[in-house]
């Protein structure tokens, strides 16, 4: 299953709803391109909704880390929401949970921007 990315705005925050797989190849490239496009448009508050992501491999994790780093380098913030149990476990095993801001819902992630502004 390919990666589908739907974009929407919520209180001035860009929310990317991801569905499918984030794996080596086209899916990772697609996500990387989308993040770069948003940053080029001046979007600085990003939330990735991962509720419908079925599988993330190591390349997908690398893409998320690269996206996070690129966002930071552009003065932007990228937060993760709605992690599946399996992906949450992956983040804990790899210690990446200490890198990302992770929220139980998109609403919580969006609200967190208001608290830091």
Image: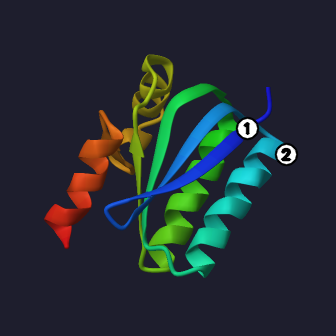
Quick one: SS at disc 1? loop
Badge number at residue 99: none
Taking 113 as reference, is 1 above or below it? above
Point 31% across, 62% down: residue: 11
Mark 1 near mark 2, Cβ–Cβ under 8 Å? yes
Residue 68 image offset from top left, x and y in percent:
50, 60
Badge number at residue 3: 1
Residue 51 image offset from top left, x and y in percent:
48, 29
Which quarter of the image is occupied by the N terminus?
top right
Q: Answer with left or right where residue 54 lies relative to residue 42.
A: right
Taking 1 as reference, is 44 above or below it? below
Give the residue number, with chain letter if any, for mark 2. Answer: 26
Q: Answer with left or right where residue 52 lies relative to residue 58.
A: left
Point 50% across, 35% down: residue: 50
Q: Earlier in the sequence, mark 1 or mark 2?
A: 1
Point 50% across, 26% down: residue: 87
Q: Answer with left or right where residue 110 lies relative to residue 83.
A: left
Front of the two marks 1 and 2: 1
Quick one: SS at disc 2? helix
Which quarter of the image is occupied by the C terminus?
bottom left
Residue 40 image offset from top left, x and y in percent:
62, 80
């Amino acid at each position: 299953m390919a990666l589908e990315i739907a974009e929407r705005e919520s209180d001035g925050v860009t929310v990317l709803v991801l569905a499918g797989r984030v794996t080596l190849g086209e899916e990772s490239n697609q996500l990387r391109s989308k993040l770069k496009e948003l940053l080029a448009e001046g979007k600085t508050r990003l939330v990735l909704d991962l509720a419908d992501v079925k599988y993330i491999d190591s390349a997908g994790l690398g893409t998320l880390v690269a996206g996070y780093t690129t966002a930071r380098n552009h003065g932007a913030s990228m937060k993760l929401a709605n992690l599946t149990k399996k992906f949450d476990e992956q983040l804990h095993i790899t210690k990446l949970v200490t890198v990302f801001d992770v929220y139980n819902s998109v609403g919580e992630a969006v609200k967190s921007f208001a608290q830091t502004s």
